Image: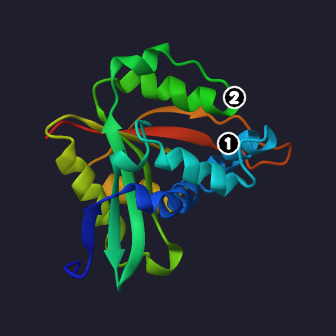
């Protein structure tokens, strides 16, 4: 069923698509973070800032860590993953909203961490997310695989649960706005293969 889906290593030329898909995967959280940089004069729009971040040569979670899925002649989705090394323990949250996620990540040092997994909405439901997830599990090379998703993201929770991920911990999300919907960040982990 998914033979029409092709995966390839991302290149720097994919930075714009990576920024859009990372923002989709985070339900706008990424562009909210990029907006702060924009307000400081780093770029003209949040997505431009995201594109700049994704195109950085040595950035963790940038183009070098990304795998692009293509279907029907277009970019369909992305997964961005990397080994979560000891260096994460030295990172402090500079924005309160990132604190709970950073704290959860610090509990799974040594695992393969999927920072983003996103598929364009018009291409969901045909196996692209599953294919990207399988590829990330393979890239983990027998390490545990971890990721964080929102407690109200039923589609993601279902996909990960069907693929051997179990909830390891939760942390209340810091609201971005006064009227933000309350939710928790859910750390999910899949045991080493």
**Which element is circle 1 on?**
helix
Q: Is residue 110 visible?
A: yes
In this rendering, would 169 be left or right of 70? right
Q: Nearer the viewer, residue 145 or 15?
A: 15
Q: Locate residue 135, reporting x and y percent.
A: 23, 56
Most foreground residue, 122 or 12: 12
| Residue closest to the eye, 53 or 113 | 53
> Where is residue 165 shown, x and y percent of the image?
31, 46
Residue 1 vs 58, above or below: the answer is below
Q: CA distance from mark 2 to mark 1?
A: 8 Å
Compared with residue 158, is residue 97 higher up or lower down, i.e. above or below?
above
Residue visible at 67% across and 45% down in the picture:
34
How far across and down, in percent of the image, does residue 163 sit? 27, 55
Q: Residue furthest top?
A: 90
Residue projecting furthest to the right: 178
**Measuring 41% from the left and 73% from the top, which residue is drawn there?**
76
Q: Residue at x 34, y 79 (%)?
A: 71
**Left or right relative to 137: residue 48:** right
Residue depicted at 40% across the width and 22% down the height: 107
Q: Which image quarter is the C terminus in?
A: top left
First along the sequence among labels 2 and 1: 1
Residue on which the image places disc 1:
33
Marks 2 and 1: CB-CB under 8 Å?
A: yes
- Secondary structure beneath disc 2? loop
The residue most toward the bottom is 72
Q: Within the image, what quadrant is residue 62 found in?
A: top left
Instruction: Return the residue at label 2.
Output: 95
Q: Is residue 158 visible?
A: no
Q: Position of residue 35 (x, y in %)?
A: 74, 46
> On the rendered image, what quadrant is the N terminus found in?
bottom left
Relative to residue 156, is residue 33 depicted above or below? above
Residue density around tag 2, few if under 14, some if 14–19, many if 20 or more, within 10 Å: few
């Amino acid at each position: 069923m998914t033979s029409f889906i092709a995966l390839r290593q991302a290149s720097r030329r994919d930075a714009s698509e990576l920024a859009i898909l990372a923002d989709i995967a985070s339900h706008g959280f990424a562009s909210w973070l990029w907006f702060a940089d924009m307000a400081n004069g780093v770029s003209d729009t949040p997505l431009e800032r995201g594109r700049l971040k994704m195109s950085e040569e040595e950035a963790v979670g940038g183009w070098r860590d990304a795998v692009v899925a293509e279907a029907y002649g277009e970019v369909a989705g992305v997964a961005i993953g990397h080994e979560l090394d000891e260096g994460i323990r030295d990172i402090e949250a500079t924005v309160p909203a990132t604190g709970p996620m950073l704290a959860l990540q610090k509990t799974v040092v040594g695992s393969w961490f999927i920072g983003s997994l996103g598929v364009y909405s018009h291409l969901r439901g045909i196996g692209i997310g599953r294919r990207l997830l399988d590829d990330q599990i393979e890239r983990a090379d027998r390490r545990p695989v971890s990721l964080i998703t929102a407690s109200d993201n039923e589609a993601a929770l279902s996909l990960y649960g069907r693929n051997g991920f179990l909830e390891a911990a939760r942390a209340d999300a810091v609201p971005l706005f006064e009227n933000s919907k309350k939710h928790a960040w859910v750390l999910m982990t899949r045991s080493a293969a």
